[in-house]
Image (cartoon, rainbow, N blue to C red):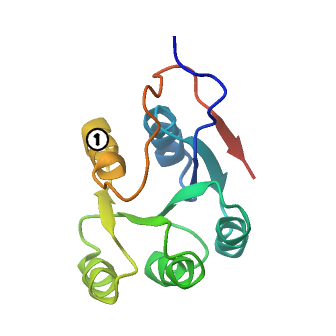
Amino acid sequence: MPDSSKAKSKLILLESDSATIQRFVRTASRLYEVVIERSASQAVALATADPSVGVFVAGASDEPPSSVLERVKSARADVLRVLLTEPTDLVSIVEGLHSGAIERTIQKPLEVDEVLSALAATSRHAILAGAGVGASHASVR
């Protein structure tokens, strides 16, 4: 029986598209408690203030995602930074990877395997053993 006393670490999703949010939450909530933000400033503030945040995913929002991820890197270098992007947004991808602001990318439209792979593909960010595939644990701000 899984240890229910262990809380999932948090993943902040900064995204404005409702369909993308819905699909991402269905997938990512298998591994993380997903917090949805639509404001870049609020999302960065939450990542900075909350030590349980382990992953920050930046997509379409009120600021360019690569600059948001750069701010997260400056404030919390321990947080996995993921760019949620269109395949045609090569400039942001290349700039963010070269600066170190982006550690992973996930391209739209979202594919379940790609999302899970990007979120689980790093050993320096702990993913709780035995994370269930159960109900979504998302909150919208």
Residue ID for mark 1: 111
Question: Residue 87: which quarter of the image?
Answer: bottom left
Relative image position of residue 121 (x, y in whole percent)? 27, 51
Is residue 114 placed above or below 91 in the rendered structure?
above
Residue closer to the observer: 4 or 71: 4
**Disc 1 secondary structure class:** loop
Is residue 33 placed above or below 59 in the rendered structure?
above
Residue closer to the observer: 126 or 60: 126
In the rendered structure, which amino acid carries the disc numbered 1? Glu
Is residue 4 placed above or below 6 in the rendered structure?
above
Question: Which residue corresponds to the image point at 56% horizontal and 47% vertical from the top-left?
Answer: 18
Question: Residue 95: which quarter of the image?
Answer: bottom left
Marker count (numbered)? 1
Relative image position of residue 113 (x, y in whole percent)? 26, 38
Question: Which residue corresponds to the image point at 47% horizontal and 31% vertical from the top-left?
Answer: 30
Query: Taking 16 as reference, is 133 left or right?
Result: left
Question: Which residue corresponds to the image point at 58% horizontal and 22% vertical from the top-left?
Answer: 3
Residue closer to the observer: 102 or 50: 50
Query: Taking 130 as reference, is 7 left or right?
Result: right
Is residue 13 placed above or below 98 in the rendered structure?
above
**Label 1, residues with CA under 10 Å away: few <14, some 14-19, many ≥20:** some
Query: Taking 140 as reference, is 134 left or right?
Result: left
